[in-house]
Image (cartoon, helix red, strand yellow):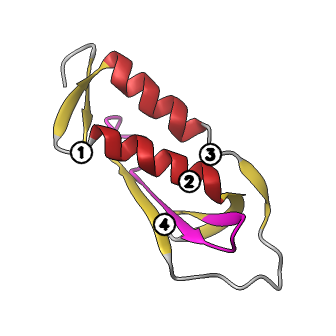
Amino acid sequence: AEEGRYQFSEAEIDQSAYHDLYTELLSVLIAGEIPEDGTLSEEELLALSFERNIEAAPDLEVVYHAYDEEYATVQVNDTELFLVKRADVEKLKQTIKSYG
């Protein structure tokens, strides 16, 4: 996309919309480590793909899975990493839907 324009899904969005989406994405913060005895779920809440425009930076696949009523797990490039607040993931989903 040209300067000041950003690609989201199949559409170009302006810088303000991109900023809103990026801010919402960053609001999903780590809430803790996954307990060693924790059971991981296959229930996918949200999956995101980031195609990087810098050759040295790899593309990213980020998947949020249900964990329990309060938390979700975040998986980056097939590795489950941390717990995040499920409500934050749900809010991110709603923000994405509003642009999709």
Q: Nearer the viewer, residue 78 or 7?
A: 7
Secondary structure at numbered mark 1: loop
Q: Which residue is mark 4?
A: 45
Locate residue 74, reporting x and y percent: 60, 62
Cα separation, mark 2 vs mark 4, equals 8 Å
Relative height, residue 51 to residue 26 (above, below): below
Relative height, residue 2 to residue 46 (above, below): above
Cα separation, mark 1 vs mark 2, equals 18 Å
Locate residue 47, reporting x and y percent: 42, 61
Q: Residue at x 58, y 37 (%)?
A: 26
Q: Which residue is mark 1?
A: 9
Q: Which residue is mark 3?
A: 28
What amino acid does circle 3 point to?
A: Val
Which callout, 1 or 4, points at the residue further toward the start of the chain? 1
Cα separation, mark 1 vs mark 3, equals 20 Å
Cβ–Cβ under 8 Å for marks 3 and 2:
yes
What amino acid does circle 4 point to?
A: Leu
Secondary structure at numbered mark 4: strand
In the rendered structure, the answer to whether residue 9 lies left or right of residue 29 reads left
Q: Residue at x 33, y 40 (%)?
A: 98
Which callout, 1 or 3, points at the residue further toward the start of the chain? 1
Which callout, 3 or 4, points at the residue further toward the start of the chain? 3
Q: Quadrant of residue 85?
A: bottom right
In the rendered structure, the answer to whether residue 40 lies left or right of residue 23 reads right
What amino acid does circle 1 point to?
A: Ser
Locate residue 62, reporting x and y percent: 48, 58
Q: Which residue is mark 2?
A: 89
